[in-house]
Amino acid sequence: MPIGTTLTKFLLEEQRRYPDSTGNFTSLFSDLVIAGKILSREVNRAGLADILGATGDKNTHGEEVQKLDEFANSAIIRTMEHGGHLSAMASEEMEDIIKVDSKYPKGNYLLLFDPLDGSSNIDVNISVGTIFSIIKCDNGCDVSTKDFLQAGAEQVCAGYILYGSSTMLVYTTGHGVHGFTLDPSVGEFLLSHENIRIPEKGKIYSINEGNSRHWLPGTSMYIEKLKANEKGPSARYVGSLVADFHRNLLKGGIFLYPADKKSKNGKLRLLYEANPLSFIVEQAGGKSTTGDKRILDIVPDELHQRVPLIIGSKLDVEEAESFWKYQEAR
């Protein structure tokens, strides 16, 4: 489609390709877009409103809750619960699933989301974002936590909304990856990046080197190998996963938050971060792994399961994997 096509038109054209489509997914996605617009507005006025800083509370992971985290979480729930397309939701910020109130109709989809990834950076004006994943559910009103524990390969849609110098929505339904940029003058997301393909090999690596004292041998060997090459990749690390991932998706590169001596199971959440971004990167021609296992093949045991994540350009990820396999063989 031509650049500048509205997201609404793009979704309708996609829907028409499938004669049996009911339009429920398109309506669900449209509700999600409204939530994104609301959050974009609040993020952009954060310095002018009393929504900067921490609330003083801790979330289910023991992390300090930012005021904007709380607002984002509530805004998504309020926007999505009444549409009639969801049975339940799960948020990275909440310990249990959120069942749709009985006063609203229910559908056969489940929504998982990280309401505001990188929110600790909002005070210093670094890009943050909302990450989301949509899966099917056949149980309707009888939905339970178990229904959310599906392998990432079962996702029907995944994406993120990046709030930066512009607001951009990137998503996939398993038919390529497409990016839309919000035009604030008309209040519409317009097609700006059609069929995104990540370069097979990149020139960027992203890892928190402040954790180097905790690294396992494979990680240390891989990073040292990159540094030893005078023409090797440059280090770029924002500390906001969605921002680091977005840059690498467009320019090529690798992001690593591997298992280490301190976090043997990794730190990032499988259902809210690793799965949706892995679905996107694979659809764009890249790769995602724990170091020895494809992320999308993991069947989760719990709602807030953590996982090591190595994600990005295909050849870069495969090279990193070889160091993990060497480490395990020793």
Image: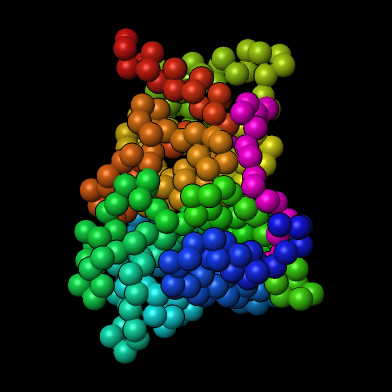
Horizontal side of residue 244 vs 108, given as left or right? right
In magenta stretch: residue 7: no
Magenta residues, start to end: 189-206
Q: Is residue 328 above or below residue 291?
A: above
Q: How many marks?
A: 0
* Furthest-top residue in this view: 330
In magenta stretch: residue 192: yes
Q: Is residue 140 above or below residue 134?
A: below
Quadrant (top left, top right, bottom left, bottom right) of the C terminus: top left
Horizontal side of residue 17 vs 270, given as left or right? right
Q: Could you say which quadrant of the image residue 13 lies in?
A: bottom right
Residue occupying the point 64% across, 45% down:
196
Q: Is residue 56 above or below residue 172?
A: below
In the image, residue 65 lies at what x, y percent?
A: 45, 64
Q: Nearer the viewer, residue 71 or 51?
A: 71
Residue occupying the point 49% across, 34% down:
287
Residue occupying the point 43% across, 66% down:
20
